[in-house]
Image: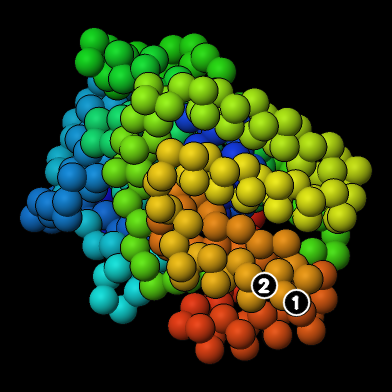
Amino acid sequence: MADNYAAKAFGKLILMGEFAVLDGCSNFTVALERGVTCTFIPDGPETHLGPLTDSALNTVYSYLEESGKEVKHGSLSIANELVDENGMKIGLGSSGAIVVSVIDSVLKAYGIEPSVSLLYRLGTIAEARVQPDGSFTDIAAAACGGFFEYSPIDPDWIGAKITTDNVKDIVESQWPLVTATRYSWPEGLTLLIGWTHEESSTPNIIKKYQTIRTKYKKEHQAFTKDATQIITSFRKALDRGDSARIDEAIRNYRKCVQNLLVAVNLPLYTKKLSKLVKLAERHGAAAKPSGAWGGDCGFALCASAEQVELIKQDWLKAGITPIEATFAPAKFDI
């Protein structure tokens, strides 16, 4: 083995479909060039950098051993572009990027150039062992790149599999429902991301959403019905390249989530996120929070360079850090 093996995995931003993706809907996600690079050093002292990295290592080691490889543990170093200088996550898919970059670097050390599908499946297994209730969108983005519509694996299915089957058998089994469909970014629109400097916890918010399902069934059903229609409208607008309808769907989905949060008295539309949206909308850009809400990031779809600069200036005055999105290259199978 050579001295070290490095692999980079991408960050992500969910544009459309958050929350509803946990109910069988699809979401639309952008993978970002900004990401995580892991360097694996074979035969080095074992590194323990937290539950996610341990799970990623244990998962890929199991896969290699079950594939007939003689595995020697090693050490890791991680360069993370998805946290600030103090180590705070900025809400762009750090967990998934860490998991996928660890798995990719270890596979490379054993002479395996993994497919996107292999990275996605091993990454999902690893993340499900630690955070079992999510959609694994961050894993899909970290592995796939590009701009895509994603329909996730059933978390109950993967949850059952990881308790009964070995890793290699899970990887090689038929995975129900999972799809990722590549899209071209709409011409004439620039994605501008804003970071609120408020950290949100996706696992905690997912638990709150699960409570909504059982405690507020009427409100939840109304949300999923409306969300499904808006996601369909967004897909049709993308297919037609209709910027006005794309903007309309973004705004409608924001209002759809807001309506649910108000109905169940869950204050995830924070003052900072609200400010981010209002400042962008003041300049005519469609804007909304991303991902789990509750903090982290929002975004604006801008139609001109002038609009981008005006929003940046206003966000900075409000303590919101603009992040210009550089899209990750699309790889693409899943």
Residue at position x 71%, y 47% from top?
Answer: 252
Tell me: 297 left or right of 112.
right
- Quadrant housing residue 274: bottom right
Q: Which amino acid does label 2 sit on?
A: Ala
Q: Is mark 1 on a helix, strand or loop?
A: loop
Measured as percent of width and height from the top left, residue 175 is found at 49, 16
Indicate whether 273 appears above or below 218.
below
For residue 42, above or below residue 270: above
Q: In this view, does 102 lie above or below 35?
A: above
Circle 2 Cα neighbour tier, 10 Å, few/some/many (<14 / 14–19 / ≥20): many
Q: Is residue 334 visible?
A: no
Q: In which quarter of the image is residue 192?
A: bottom right
> Where residue 215 sits: x, y (%)?
37, 25
Residue that appears at 85% across and 59% down: 187
The local crowd at label 1, few if under 14, some if 14 to 19, many if 20 or more residues have their Cα within 10 Å, is some
Residue placed under numbered mark 2 in the picture = 280
| CB-based contact (under 8 Å), mark 1 and mark 2 | yes
Q: Which residue is nearer to you in this view: 197 or 331?
A: 197
Residue labelled with disc 1? 283
Mark 1 to mark 2 CA distance (whole Å): 5 Å
Report whether residue 159 is seen: yes
